[in-house]
Image (spheres, helix red, strand yellow):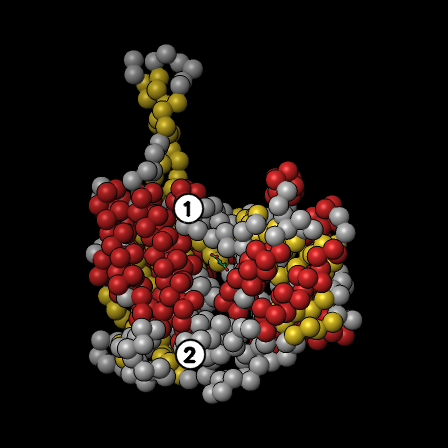
Amino acid sequence: MNTLGFRVIWRMTTPPGDGQMAAHARFRTQNLIAGAWAGSHTGRTFAVSNPATDEHLADVPDCDEKDIARAIDAAVVAQRNWARMPAPERAKIIRRCADIMHDRIDDLATIMTLEQGKPIAEAAGEIRYAASFLVHAAGEAERVYGQTIPSSFEDKHILAIRQPVGVACAITPWNFPSAMITRKLGPALAAGCAMIVKPAELTPLSALALGDVCIDAGVPEGLVSIITGDAATIGKAMFADFRVRKISFTGSTEVGKILVRQSADNLQRLSLELGGHAPFIVFEDADIDAALDGAIACKYRNGGQTCICANRFIVHRSVHDAFVAGLVERSRALKVGIGTEKDANIGPLINDDAIEKVDRHVADARAKGATIHCGGERAKVNGGADRFYQPTVMTGITREMVCWNEETFGPVCPVMVFDDEDEAINLANDTEYGLAGYFYTRDASRLMRVAEALKFGVVGANDASPSTAQAPFGGVKMSGFGREGGHFGVSEYLDTKYVSWNVS
Ligand code: SIN
């Protein structure tokens, strides 16, 4: 590490100049707190390593309440000035953040692949996706409109105005280390809020790299802090401070429930994007090739470690065999490998717990009678840790199997058969989760009927990649509440106030 708190990555596995890897990428190893790079006040750190190889990447600060308090103090002051700044100027700064992300895409993608494991091309895709949230939010900053409302009294006018909630906090996951930050940060800044970002302990380096992006784009000092450390300690400190008025969390349902309880004392607003268990229905009239393309893209995105990825394939009996044959052929064609290798399609699972969960789900299905058509075991990867899993297709899935009831979060396709539309809808809705659901059909009437019947916040109708910065992303039921994206996302950071104006 040098004195500026960087660790330069000179030991890249792929030679520079191939357009894929940034040999000069560097890790920030300090936190952005109150406008300056700093360690934790205790000097404590924790280690970050590469899930593909177990290589030690960096040590980052293990912050606690005292560090958080400094960030909040600075955020309160910075937010007041930021909210006063004309919206077009705020928009310009937010847009500049996106431009810088594009300029640094190789570095940012490299950092992401090293700490998270996803293939480098996918990491670059995530950087573009992450930047798109900033671009869209910048536009929304200029469209935070209020309303005038007709009053029942002739001497009164009612004005409804929308104002920033104040200081907000983002608690973000390891599976999308950049996009899940900008999806919160962009709207927060657009609304006129300050934000303290607490990234996942497994992937803090992408978040810290965004700190540099913010500084270089001209984000005012103290407006954005990026703090690493133990989730429980930092979360508790955020909820304990009345000045933090909004917390947006992406992660597990289990943690989401804890946050709801913690928000009670200070009544902070929450947005929770929690677990999913997405069904993927293929009707008898579907375009099977399109459904297969969608299935592969959706299921194997980030190696299946995506909250909205297909978890349960529900396929009409008449097309079952053809769909399964195509799924197996396409799954076998995918290369499992270290994400920094150019041709890898599927990287490692994030940690040992994650791969053990996949092992358990597959073993349970096998023991209960499922047929494994491909995969079904860990993959050996040259120079890699024992954390890779083969793309797996299983049929003969029943409701008793664990994979039917729990999100696997790995590269596994369990396929169940159905006979009629009602049965497919009931099977799809047979879960407490409600984040995303998909179906393929060429029948326009069925399309609308099924879209309405599915109990999910996001429905992909002949579309397995529905995510985009303009749309109101979020779940129902145990998948949480609140929406991210578009003007819906900005509203999460705004309070509505009405002014009753006596004009007599
Ligand atoms: C997620 O897995 O939570 C995010 C996926 C997306 O934004 O498409």
State the quadrant of the C terminus. Answer: top left
Helix, strand, or loop for circle 2?
loop
* Percent of width and height locating residue 121: 40, 68
Dot label at residue 470:
1
Q: CA distance from mark 1 to mark 2?
A: 32 Å
Q: With 468 as the anchor, is 3 left or right in this view?
A: left
> Would you call the spot at circle 1 few (<14 residues within 10 Å), some (14-19), or many (20 or more)?
some
Dot label at residue 306:
none
Question: Which sits in the foreground, 122 or 64?
Answer: 122
Q: What's under tag 1, amino acid-wise?
A: Gln
* Percent of width and height locating residue 145: 34, 34
Residue for point 33% across, 52% down = 134
Instruction: Point out the residue furthest to the bottom here.
Output: 383
For residue 128, which quarter of the picture? bottom left
State the quadrant of the N terminus. Answer: bottom left
Residue for point 64% across, 79% down = 377
Q: What's under tag 2, amino acid-wise?
A: Glu
